[in-house]
Image (cartoon, grey):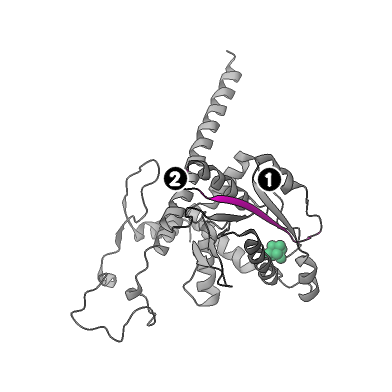
Amino acid sequence: MPEHIAVADKKAEKAAYEGNKLTKRLRHHVGDAINDFNMIEAGDRVMVCLSGGKDSFALLDILLGLQKSAPIDFSIVAVNLDQKQPGFPEHVLPAYLESIGVEYRIVEEDTYSIVKRVIPEGKTTCSLCSRLRRGVLYRVAEELGATKIALGHHRDDMLHTLFLNMFYGGKLKSMPPKLVSDNGKHMVIRPLAYCREKDLERYAELRAFPIIPCNLCGSQPNLQRQVVKEMVNDWDKRFPGRVETMFTAMQNVVPSHLADAKLFDFAGLKVGDALAEGDTAFDKEEFTDPRPLDEDGKPRRAFSILDSRAKENACGG
Ligand code: SF4
């Protein structure tokens, strides 16, 4: 066999192997999130909100895959809200949804004109736009008899929101994997809660989803979110593992070691009370890696926060 064909075969084999590994990893993460938060139960009708972006395509695709192998029966209906943004390619999603044979509903509601009319030129329109969209989606969920509303937010979105709330909102709060809708009538779930954005990007390429660009509305991106995203991405490059550790931290909250008197009864604390956690202020700065083993079963390692300081200095940070 000519050498260039053998090299091409090897590359294709490697790409197929990597694609398979990625698919398994994402399915695993979604399955784990569904189990950990009891997101989907037998008999549920799950309304998957499909915006046309990579995350919602991946969400629908992975849920459809899991539905086939799940030990429980649940149904899926995909919903897209056509907000009448100029240039929205309205044929793309129906064609895709027909091709995969899933039940779907396209809802046409001109929220774009409302937003344009109400928000002064040059101001960020996202907050009103999302509020209007949410209202329509809740209404549609009711019409469709959906018991769960699935959104495509992933782990990075959750982390970014955590920092946004800390930096600009003065709150230690993120996007929960599961919550009751603000009208109190629906359960909203985020099955991609454990998925990394870069995995979803690669998955979208692998599956060749017909992605619709998200800037059709012409809105300026939220600068604060952009800043936080760049900060987290920069950490991810310079300190591999930090993002995973931060996400694990969101699942290991110790109210007795924060300062919210509404969460922990500091006033009633007495000598002799059992502590959930020692006073780590006096512990040496060395931790056991709290991240779970990855799918390759890589062993946990002990690391010191001084490790990252050394790297920071080396990078001039
Ligand atoms: S980017 Fe545009 S479509 Fe998306 S939420 Fe903001 S205003 Fe709405």
Extreme residue in the top direction: 1
Extreme residue in the bottom direction: 267
Side of 257 relative to 14 (left or right):
left
Which residue is denoted by mark 1 in the rendering? 97
Q: What residue is at 35 percent from the left and 60 percent from the top?
A: 306
Q: Secondary structure at mark 1?
A: helix
The quarter holding residue 140 reads bottom right
Viewer-nearest of discs 2 and 1 = 2
Q: What kind of residue is marked 1?
A: Leu
User: Which quadrant would the N terminus be assigned to in this image?
Assistant: top right
Q: What residue is at 48 percent from the left and 57 percent from the top?
A: 39
Question: Which quarter of the frame holds ligand 1?
Answer: bottom right
Q: In this rendering, is residue 184 above or below 243?
A: below
Side of 108 relative to 276 (left or right):
right
Q: Which numbered tag is attached to residue 71?
A: 2
Q: What kind of residue is marked 2?
A: Pro
Of the pair 190 and 16, the residue shown nearer to us: 190
> What is the x, y in percent for residue 47?
60, 56
Residue 120 visible in the displayed image: no
